[in-house]
Image: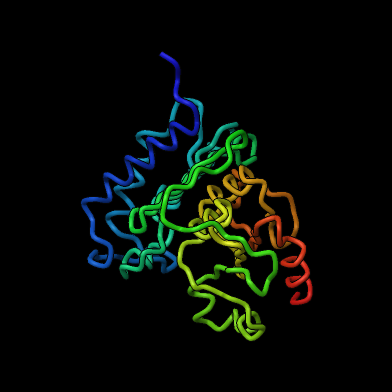
Amino acid sequence: MTAPTDLQRIEIALNTARAVLQDFTPGRIASTRKEGGDPVTEADIAVDDALRSVLLADGEGWLSEETTDDLGRLKNSRVWIVDPIDGTREFIEGIPEWCVSIGLAVDGQPVAGGIVNPATEERIIGDLTTPPFYEGPAEPATATSLETATILASRSEIRRGEWERFTDMGLDVVPMGSVAYKLALVAAGRADATWTLVPKREWDVAAGVALLASAGAHYRRKDSAPVVFNAPDTLLPGFIACRREIAGKVESLLSDES
């Protein structure tokens, strides 16, 4: 029997996660606080366990927000980088802006990724040989200028007033929870751009970056350093992503704002 491809493994894992999540109701689930203050639910842990059971194979490493980090992963060429529920706050509040996020890095490079948002019935998967496949209701983005672009922004960053300088320009800034979801929508051509103003963890962006690479979209770290995953320190600076058609305009805007 032929072994499943990485994309097939990701698809199986996303379907498994979706099945697990049927036992939980967004907006009606208790949560606790992890060290550091971030919320976590029984659903986060259940999905983490399910993903690990179907994805992880001998010789592969594992990095997940909900699993105690084992730095033994640094010895592995192939490492799964997952967030069982990216956007847990939105999941708890019943806001449909969360997703299950799965990325695969090989020798530090993102090579395949996928997300599923059961609340919106969206699924996006892709790798370096296959452009992102989008399943869902959103129409393709077609902007060729910043004035007509749909820009996805962190809901919490907007609440803190950190996006006022962009909204004051008249830009169409849409608040959204999960950063993995935002990156995936840009990769799938369902939104025009997104960027983060604060650092993120590898598991927040790995799947999205893999999908952006799959799409040939424009992306970079905020500090312009090489995008490498499976590092000892999983904290990354802010991230910028957009459709290639408006990359120059986005970079010009952010250069003016720096």
Asked whether residue 32 appears in the rendered view, the answer is: yes
Q: Position of residue 84 (x, y in %)?
A: 39, 50
Q: Indicate the quadrant containing the C terminus: top left, top right, bottom left or bottom right.
A: bottom right
Asked whether residue 82 appears in the rendered view, the answer is: no
Q: Indicate the quadrant containing the N terminus: top left, top right, bottom left or bottom right.
A: top left
Residue in the picture at 63% in, 82% down: 170
Count of numbered tags: 0
Residue in the picture at 64% in, 40% down: 108
Residue furthest to the top in view is 1
The image shows residue 7, relative to residue 83, as above or below, that is above
Q: Position of residue 137 (x, y in %)?
A: 41, 56
Question: Image quarter for residue 98?
Answer: bottom left
Colour convention:
rainbow
Q: Position of residue 36 (x, y in %)?
A: 45, 66
Residue in the picture at 73% in, 60% down: 247
Q: Position of residue 8 (x, y in %)?
A: 44, 31
**In the displayed structure image, the side of residue 29 where residue 108 appears, left or right:** right
Residue in the picture at 66% in, 75% down: 147
Q: Nearer the viewer, residue 234 or 133?
A: 133
